[in-house]
Amino acid sequence: MTEAITQIRAKGLQTAVLSNNFYLPNQKSFLPLDRKQFDVVVESCVEGICKPDPRIYKLCLERLGLQPSESIFLDDLGPNVKAAASLGIHTIKVNDPETAVKELEALLGFTLRLGVPNTQPVRKTMEIPKDSLKKYLKDLLGIQTTGPLELLQFDHGQSNPTYYIRLANRDLVLRKKPPGTLLPSAHAIEREFSVVGTPFYVMEYCPGLIYKDPSLPGLEPSHRRAIYTAMNTVLCKIHSVDPQAVGLEDYGKQGAYIPRQVRTWVKQYRASETSTIPAMERLIEWLPLHLPHQQRTTLVHGDFRLDNLVFHPEKPEVLAVLDWELSTLGDPLIDVAYSCLAHYLPSSFPVLRGFNDCDLTQLGIPAAEEYFRMYCLQMGLPPTENWNFYMAFSFFRLAAILQGVYWRSLTGQASSAHAEQTGKLTEFVSNLAWDFAVKEGFRVFKEMPFKNPLTRFCHTWARSQSQWYPIGTRSYSSVPEASPAHASRGGLVISPESLSPPVRELYHRLKRFMEQHVYPAEPELQSHQASAARWSPSPLIEDLKEKAKAEGLWNLFLPLEADPEKKYGAGLTNVEYAHLCELMGTSLYAPEICNCSAPDTGNMELLVRYGTEAQKARWLMPLLEGKARSCFAMTEPQVASSDATNIEASIREEDSFYVINGHKWWITGILDPRCQLCVFMGKTDPHAPRHRQQSVLLVPMDTPGIKIIRPLTVYGLEDAPGGHGEVRFERVHVPKENMVLGPGRGFEITQGRLGPGRIHHCMRLIGFSERALALMKARVKSRVAFGKPLVEQGTVLADIAQSRVEIEQARLLVLRAAHVMDLAGNKAAALDIAMIKMVAPSMASRVIDRAIQAFGAAGLSSDYPLAQFFTWARALRFADGPDEVHRATVAKLELKHRI
């Protein structure tokens, strides 16, 4: 607006300001702007009237000596604009300054933006000899002019100063090395001989937009996404250039690009080092030891980021790519990683702004992972496994650059006015780099196969130079030797990226589905659960189920051992499903959407394992298709049902039927109108041996005699539409063919039903915990208390650290249990299963509780999933068997098998 006012006054037009302002305690009016910009200043505190009173507009017009039709009024408040328009004044409602200037230009009939964007007068330390430059350009371009050479300096860029030049009718850009003594091999601009004191090159000026703030303020989310998509696309185009076809096969050395880069930036850092930075020392040692084994070679830009792109003013199209001084032939993933730096930097970072403290979903900007997938998709490449290395190196390089900028600022050579600040930033950025190095180390560790996955190893580690070696190794076996058939299934897979290619692709497909469909639907689904229609299934859930089915994200839970021919499910091992189940566990709704929710999963597995073909046809197929729901009736209010042998509900044989009588409660899912099957456990022979008294019947829900007494609440939550019911079964007649396996087989069946299903809840609890921790981290970054962000409070940092440690510990234990189940069977995994059922719910309760504490009262509300997560985690300390039972199991097995 200041620039617009300058151009308006240059045309001989008058300007005025109408301000609703006030007096300061010193009796001076508060008006923080340059009054010299205006012919008339009208202040409400002085005149005693304010906008939108028509009198203040008339007073202004009178002092200007104008009629209403001869004036234009701009304001950002609707009532003020409306009042001016009622007097016949032309008006512009200012929602966005850029748009308002365009509207003003249309009314005035001339441009208001004659200056060159992003420029300023040349800084004193960056001045260059204009006369010699003018002579050089006139000779070079054949320009015959006596007019002056206009010279401005672009206001961004940390290394090589860049200038705007206008000579006659030519608009040019000059980029040069900084003056003075430079670091070895830095600022490689040897494109022309020196006529300005240092080497330089000249290029055509390309008018357009340069977005210096990567969060793109003022743009719509869809426009922001389009900008980043265009950025990604142009990077793919650069990397698709055939160097030989365009004569650039000798543009750089072939091969070993990253080792050379590491050596170069280590050398650059050492040359500008002003103090010892521990993280930089660790990285200098770590990077050469973790170089990628496979590297592609393409043309690389070397400094590819948003503010080095010139965009079309009207559409998301890249017109030019700037700053090619680091370009060469090398590994293209360096460019991809470097273009993602802003994703991990805060918006307050003074040199290179970021947006890691912003809500990317709200902004519409793709996350770094999505941006990388977008690149891989356009280039037809599989995602790289060592992405963390590339990010670690990119931040290391940025730290070295910042150190060089700071070093030059000490000698007055830096091209940016902000250079002196960078001395404090090098350590911050190097710590970010080390964070990624640590992540890469964990990835490598997780991919290491266990030679004997059934043997635990305890090591004490010592260090010699750069190598680690074990001393005092102790081992002990926890399960029997695996059979050859089981053992052939391979080592424990700790990371999703180490899954087999088909399962890894399935995992990433599920992750995309969660991001694109499930998380965005959560608010509507939560609202439905709290509405009057909550006892009817959400239409949105049904729609998402169809989408999941279409994408092959359906019935993932059935283990390979139960369904070796993959007739009913995806044929995953327990370990493979554990990774997907954890991902589904990050949302309360995802398991049902993918037809992987309890109690249906256990009931379907029961039918697959023990059901007759007729029982499968009637009950299994509708459940697998998602057309029906089911429940499992075991728990009774009158007895301690954690001991299944206590069950008192009776099953009596009468003619061709079994007649059921009993009182059950906490029957999950029985209130759902889609529930068609109740898997019922009761006693057929109370005089038989203790574990042969129980039987399991398949009871159609429309059978007379099933009376739902009431829905039960869990900490006040109804969990509609399935709910948890208290039910009476009064002389319920069930056909004999609905008996599963036969009388007296109930205990055996329930133990088998709780095979893989025993650990599904634990897998999902890891997902609960990861989501809770992610929400907590985002919350504490955005909230301030007692004068500083929550993330800087020591207790908050301690909670985050403790939660991360506990999640990783529990995940390893869950994956180990799944692995032993795959290798040696469910019975051999009894100890591991009992341990995770002890650990996972309590761990999740603690992690979620810390997140709730960080959210304050909001954590107790339904605005976030934390309250429901906590409720489920606490409930599972009963629903999946009480802690005391699992502790007793672990203790007995420990005493039985240990010395």
Image: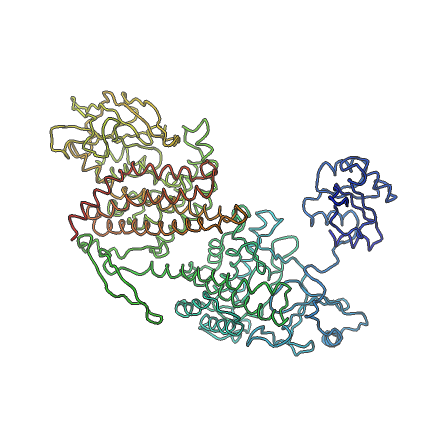
Q: Nearer the viewer, residue 890 or 789?
A: 789
Quadrant for residue 387, please give it: bottom left
Q: Nearer the viewer, residue 867 or 365?
A: 867
Task: Measuring from the top left, give residue 294's x and y in whole percent.
Answer: 40, 67
Q: Is residue 324 left or right of residue 676?
A: right
Query: Residue pushed farthest bottom?
Result: 193
* Scheme of colours in the image: rainbow
Displayed quadrant of residue 23: top right
Where is residue 145? Give x, y as percent.
Answer: 80, 72
Q: Please name the residue shown 36% across and 42% down the image.
A: 845
| Total count of labels | 0
Q: Is 455 drawn above or below residue 555 in the view shown?
A: below
Q: Vertically, is 684 above or below 332? A: above
Q: Is residue 323 left or right of residue 639?
A: right
Image quarter of residue 380: bottom left
- Residue 475 is at least partly visible in this image: yes
Percent x, y for residue 794?
45, 51
- Foreground pick, 640 / 732: 640
Residue extending farthest right? 65
Q: Is residue 720 visible?
A: no
